[in-house]
Structures are given as structure tokens and as C-alpha cells.
Image (cartoon, helix red, strand yellow):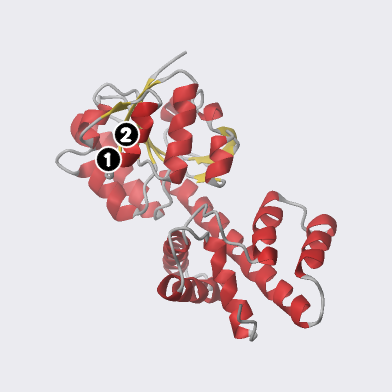
Amino acid sequence: MKHHIAFIGLGRMGQAMATNLLLAGHTLTVYNRSPDKAEAMRARGASVADTPADAVREAEVVFTMVTDDEVLRELTTGDDGILAGLPPDAVHASCSTVAPATNQELAMMHREHGSWLVAAPVFGRPIVAANGQLWVCLAGPNKAKSRLLPLLPSFSQGNFDLGEDPGAANVLKLCGNFMLGAAIEAMAEAFTLAEKSGLDRMVVFEFLTTALFNSPAYRTYGRMVAEEDYQPAGTAPSLLEKDLKLTLAEARAHQVPMPVANIILDHLTATVTRHSSADEDWTSFARRISESAGLIR
């Protein structure tokens, strides 16, 4: 069954997800604050709206994939925002990595409006989205989640249901991103130690990801760290920096010490301040370990 869908936020991940929804045969209307990215979707067959409100006027479901909490709030609640045009009983799938409290707050506003919000953050790089292999975390009203489920296979291989509190999915997303950051930090430290001890970084990578850590995260990010090749960018370092700040704020709220998260955040902040470019992946913070060990490339 085909549906009227809106998609707001057409960065690397949003473009890939929206393109797959279009390829699945759904009617798609898109909006992006930078019009050039929306025009790329027009060339693929989507309609392009001038405002979020216009994008969602006929939508059964709207997906949002934006950079941070402030942008999500503005696009949802502004004068020309989603809630100004969304039909009653429509579903907003909030896929961005934001604070749990943000989606809880917006979910309440949707209920007052007569529509629904489901938190639906995703795991995977843009190329994974393009291949339809993301993992989706779902949290929100069961009725609304059931409306989303038929759409998810166009860009994902599976989903996990975290219950009806929309904040729950974002807690899991923050935990997952922290663990990815911790894996990158650990591999950078291990590969640097191996190199300074006279071993080949790639040999160490191949052994560890074959014998002990044979998983997509370690193999994908580990190769980038071992080769010290941080292009093409999947996600910018500034976005993982933002995610770690959200993680630590949530940890403080629940009185959970996270010393490793603080270490990673320090390396990310130095990367964003000193070296980061839009073309480098978030794994590039691994350079800080090599530099600290005297390995200046």
C-alpha cells in the first residue's frame, strides 16, 4: 500500500532515507532549509515544499532527520512548522538524535494538536541507509507505531520497540552512540600502542576484528582508524560531539558517572576546534591519540 509521506531534513542520512521511500513507490513531499538539497530530491520525483507546514498538509506520516534539538523544535512548532500544517491523526516520526526530553515535550504538543509523535532514531551510516540496512529504535503510542511499521523496510533491516515513552528510544540512541565513540577511542589507543611497539596497524586490526570483535562497528570504524583515513564522511565530528554532550547531560540527570564519555568528548572538541572539516568522518578524533603519542603525520 502506498502512502503520502513528507520528509524534512535532507542531509546525507535524510537524502538516503527519503530516496528509498520514493523508490518504494510512496508519494513524497520534501522540505530542507537549504533548497539545493531539496532540488536534488525533486530530480528524483519528489515534490518540494517552501515550508514545513506546506510539506505536511497532505501527509499521513512525516519523517524528520535534522541536526539538533533547536532545529527540530523550530521546524515542528514554528509559525510555518509541522504542527501548523499536519492533518489530525497523522504521525511524526522523529528520527534525529536529540535529548529524550525534547521528544517527550514535542509528543505532548502533538497530542494536544490531535496528531502523534513516535521517536524513531536510527543506527547506521548514510551508505547503510542507501542500502536499506539501518536499524530503527521505536518509542511512542502503539497505534502510531503500527502506522510506521510498513514504511520502515524501505530503509531498514529491522527495528526494536522500546515502549510508549518517546524518550526511551533517544536514551538508547545516546547509549549506542557513546558505545561507538568508546569503541573508536579504544581502537585508536590500541592501534597507537601497537604501532609504537613495532606492529603494523592493519595486521592488528585484522586479527582483533577476526578473533575478538567481528562486528560491523569494529570492522567499519576500525579500518578507518587503522588506516587513518577519515573520508568519506558519514557523520561529522561536531554531531558526535553534540551527542556526547546530550549523553553526559542525561547521565548527570540520573547521577551516572561516565568518565570515558568525558575523555571522548575532550578529543571530539579538540578535533572540531582544530582540524575538523565537513569532509571528515567523526572517527577523525582518533588522531588525538596518535598526536599525544608523538605520531605526527
Structural crowding at the residue carrying mark 2, measured as other residues with C-alpha within 10 Å and reported as few (<14), some (14–19) or many (≥20): some
Q: Are marks 1 and 2 in contact (CB under 8 Å)?
A: yes
At 31% across and 40% down in the image, what residue appears? 36
Q: Secondary structure at mark 1?
A: helix
Amino acid on which disc 2 is placed: Glu
**Image coords of residue 85 (percent x, y):** 20, 30
- In the depicted structure, whether residue 84 falls above or below residue 60: below
- Examine the image and state in which quarter residue 41 appears: top left
Circle 1: residue type: Pro
Residue reaching furthest to the top: 1
Instruction: Give the percent coordinates (x, y) of residue 42.
Output: 34, 28
Q: Which residue is mark 1?
A: 35
- Relative to residue 45, is residue 80 drawn left or right? left
Locate the C terminus and report the quarter of the image it occupies: bottom right
Residue 164 seen in this snapshot: no
The part of the image, by quadrant, that contains residue 130 is top right
Q: Residue furthest front?
A: 297
Q: Position of residue 80 (x, y in %)?
A: 17, 38
- Judged left or right of residue 88, residue 155 is right
292 with respect to 265 (left or right): right
Q: Residue at x 24, y 30 (%)?
A: 49
Q: Position of residue 120 (x, y in %)?
A: 46, 40
The residue where tag 2 is placed is 39
Give the camera-side residue of 80 and 83. Answer: 80
In the drawing, does residue 138 fall left or right of residue 195? left
